[in-house]
Structures are given as C-alpha cells and as structure tokens.
Image (cartoon, helix red, strand yellow):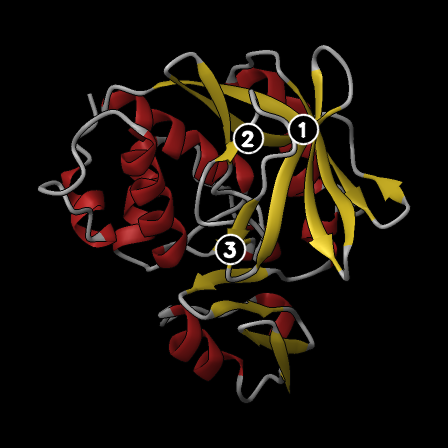
C-alpha cells in the first residue's frame, strides 16, 4: 500500500482543516495538486516511458518537481482519493481539438461521488478549474480565475465538459459515465507515447495553474495568463531552462526538441 505522506507534504495538504470526506476537502486536494504539479509531456518529447505506478510518479513529482499528462496524473490522483476514503472511479473522454476530435476515449478523467452526487475531477488536463465540476446537476458553473467551466448532459451516459470562451460555451471534451480501468487506455497510452500523429509527440506542452491564472509553455512561446490578460514570451534554446525553473520549478533537465 502506498504511503502518500511524502506527496501530501510536497502539496502542503492541510490535514487539520480538511479531513472530512466532503466537497470542501476534495477541492482542497484538487487545488493543492494543480497548483504544485504541472501538466507536461517532457517524457514523451524525450522518448522516455511515462510514469504509470505510484512510486515512480510520486518520485517524479517530489524529487524532480515534474508532472505528467492524463494517464499519469489522474491515475495517481485516483489512487490518492481512494486512499483518503473517497468513492471514485475512472472514466474515458474524447478531447475536442478545434473542429476535430482526438482518438475516441483516449483521455482519462475521474468521477467522485459525494452524498449520491457525482462530480468531474481532472488534474490531468491542461486547462481545468481548481475544483470539482458537478455532473449530477448539469450546467452548474464553476467560476475559476482561469474562466468558467461546466458539465452539460448530452444523453443518458454522455456528458460534455465546457469552458466559456468569449461568452460562448466551447466543448473541451466529451466523456462517458462508465467506469474504466487503466488497461482500457492501453491503445491511447501507446498512441500518445509513440505515434508520430499524436499531439504529444508533435508539440511540447507544459502548463501549470497559478493563483493568478496559468502559465503554459510550448516549443515556441511561454504564455502567462494573469486574471484573463495574456503575455507571450518567445522560447529559445538559450532561455527555456530559465523558464522551466522560474515558472515551473523544474531544473536539471534537457528537452530534446529544444536542444
């Protein structure tokens, strides 16, 4: 059984104020996690295996100040929530990329049940609120410094996670409320690690929530979003390590696609 104490210390979990199994505690865990652990695909960019067990993922976070993408982050967070006594299960989702869709069911997210009500939890997506999103009460808005989010119901089992962009609710991804296990994502994991058509092989993505918004880095630009206002800085071979340390607290690593 995994001892999560070292992870909790790194995340600055407040056990004294948040110990009950309720929405307030869940949101504290989510906020603490996404403010300290970036969404990133450096391993994929460097052609290295991703971390799909608790030990290697916790070491990656605590020792290297790293993160990962959905399979790494949400798998670990699922294990953590279960250890804390929450009723939680994994679901599959399909991400919308502009006018097209990613591989069907290749994104991993979580559903948490509290007092017979369901909430979407996702710490493995590059733009999410620092709180759970109601599923049992569709179209309930979660207002975050990074924008407004909600889950809408499409049919009996299908839901859409949406973000308000310029007063228009845009679908981020669609998910099925049907419990899954890690093995169900084998095809998506292989595709997103090794297939040249995968966005994760094609582009560097590092994104971290901040109290004031979000910082996101690609191969070309660092985008700082503060209270809705964006500032873009050019990323080069000469400055990318400085950006990694300053905005993501990541040190002592080379990213092959930037070398």
Residue 122 drawn above or below residue 247: above
* Quadrant in the picture for residue 81: top left
Q: Position of residue 48 (x, y in %)?
A: 52, 48
- Residue 144, labelled with which disc? 3
Q: Which one is nearer the viewer's eye here, 43 or 38? A: 38
Dot 2 alpha-carbon crowd within 10 angstroms: few under 14, some 14 to 19, many 20 or more: many
Locate the C terminus by quadrant.
bottom right
Q: Are marks 3 and 1 in contact (CB under 8 Å)?
A: no
Q: Is residue 104 above or below residue 200?
A: above
How many numbered marks appear? 3
- Position of residue 194 measured from the top left corner of the image (x, y, whole percent): 68, 41
Q: In front: 67, or 128?
A: 128
The answer to whether one can see residue 26 in this image is yes
Residue at disc 2, secondary structure: strand
Q: Is residue 58 left or right of residue 184?
A: left
Label 3: how many residues lie within 10 Å, few (<14), some (14-19) or many (20+)?
Answer: some
Which residue is labeled 2 in the image?
A: 109
* Residue behind mark 1: 93
Q: Residue at x 60, y 16 (%)?
A: 184
Residue sitting at x 45%, y 74%:
244
Residue at image point 77% right, 27% down: 104
């Amino acid at each position: 059984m995994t001892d999560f104490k070292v992870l909790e210390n790194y995340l600055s979990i407040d056990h004294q104020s948040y110990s009950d199994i309720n929405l307030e505690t869940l949101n504290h865990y989510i906020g603490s996690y996404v403010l300290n652990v970036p969404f990133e695909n450096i391993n994929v960019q460097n052609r290295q295996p991703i971390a799909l067990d608790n030990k290697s993922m916790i070491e990656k976070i605590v020792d290297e100040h790293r993160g990962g993408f959905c399979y790494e982050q949400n798998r670990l967070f699922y294990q953590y929530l279960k250890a804390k006594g929450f009723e939680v299960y994994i679901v599959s989702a399909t991400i919308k990329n502009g006018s097209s869709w990613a591989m069907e069911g290749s994104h991993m997210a979580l559903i948490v049940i509290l007092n017979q009500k369901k909430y979407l939890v996702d710490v493995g997506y590059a733009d999410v609120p620092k709180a759970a999103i109601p599923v049992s009460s569709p179209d309930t808005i979660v207002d975050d410094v990074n924008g407004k989010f909600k889950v809408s119901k499409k049919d009996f089992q299908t839901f859409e996670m949406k973000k308000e962009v310029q007063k228009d609710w845009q679908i981020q991804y669609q998910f099925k409320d049907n419990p899954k296990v890690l093995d169900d994502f084998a095809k998506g994991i292989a595709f997103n690690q090794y297939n040249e058509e995968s966005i994760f092989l094609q582009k560097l993505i590092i994104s971290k929530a901040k109290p004031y918004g979000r910082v996101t880095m690609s191969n070309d630009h660092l985008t700082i979003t503060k209270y809705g206002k964006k500032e873009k800085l050019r990323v080069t071979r000469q400055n990318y390590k400085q950006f990694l340390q300053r905005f993501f607290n990541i040190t002592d690593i080379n990213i092959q696609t930037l070398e």
